[in-house]
Image (cartoon, rainbow, N blue to C red):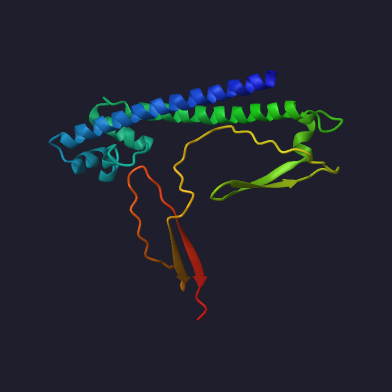
Amino acid sequence: MDEMRRLDAARQDLDQARRHRAKVLADLQKASAEAHTELRTSETSMEKWAAKAHVAPSALSLLATDREWKPRGSSVYEAIDGITGGRYRLAELRAEFDAAEAEVTKARGALRVADAAAVAAEIGPTSSRPYADTAMDVLLIDDVLVNRRPDRVILDVRLRNPGACSVNVTRAVLRILERRRFLTVFHPTADYDLLVEDDVNQVPVSHHIRPDEVDRFTLRVRLFSG
């Protein structure tokens, strides 16, 4: 039960790290929008601001949050802090976001370690030696190929035994470490035929995708035999 408690604690640590990252990212996005508004509404043009900050004009326009927004590089934020007097603490917030991102990565790694320990405790010894001494040198997972079907997901697990003794595999355990929500369309809304005649080939398609929606189509590829 100790391993399960550690696993639960690792999950909570990851959730907390992700919440902190989301908060810092929101603060950075808000500060970016405020800085962009100040520069855009000033008497100086965005081109002159960009020249003063020694950045491309597009770097300033990407501060706006009325489009698909993502954090910019630290050098861009440092330049903008220079022309705004550091009022929006953009470089500082970017550094906080990088630190929060590192904490998420660290927590995710700790969760994987805790999960492996919980699996080892649940399955128990696999030979006369302790499980922890045999897990890595008896059986390896070389790869897991993910094959998505309309109604299911197929995991193609590739195992390898690098040891000198045979290994009897009797159980497969699948643990959910993280749950993420993705927009997914399982069934294609259209099918198109594409004739491959050259290195670059194209086919007209027609789809109208509204905000926060996804779509999916298939291409039936045929090779030109002429």
150 up-or-down from 124: above or below: below
Q: Residue furthest bottom?
A: 226
76 up-or-down from 117: above or below: below
Residue at 76% across, 35% down? 135
Residue 199, can we see it?
no
Residue at 29% across, 37% down? 65
x and y percentages locating residue 33 in the rendered image: 27, 32
Residue 66, can we see it?
yes
Q: Could you say which is closer to the camera, residue 49 or residue 190?
A: 190
x and y percentages locating residue 220 in the rendered image: 49, 65
x and y percentages locating residue 164 in the rendered image: 85, 44
Q: Quadrant of residue 68?
A: top left
Indicate left or right for 173 with 128 as reference. Answer: left
x and y percentages locating residue 186 in the rendered image: 49, 49
Q: Quadrant of residue 1?
A: top right
Indicate left or right for 92 with 223 as reference. Answer: left
Indicate left or right for 87 with 142 as reference. Answer: left
Picture mark count: 0
Residue at 52% across, 78% down? 225
Indicate left or right for 162 with 199 as reference. Answer: right
Q: Could you say which is closer to the camera, residue 108 or residue 71?
A: 108
Q: Could you say which is closer to the camera, residue 187 or residue 36?
A: 187
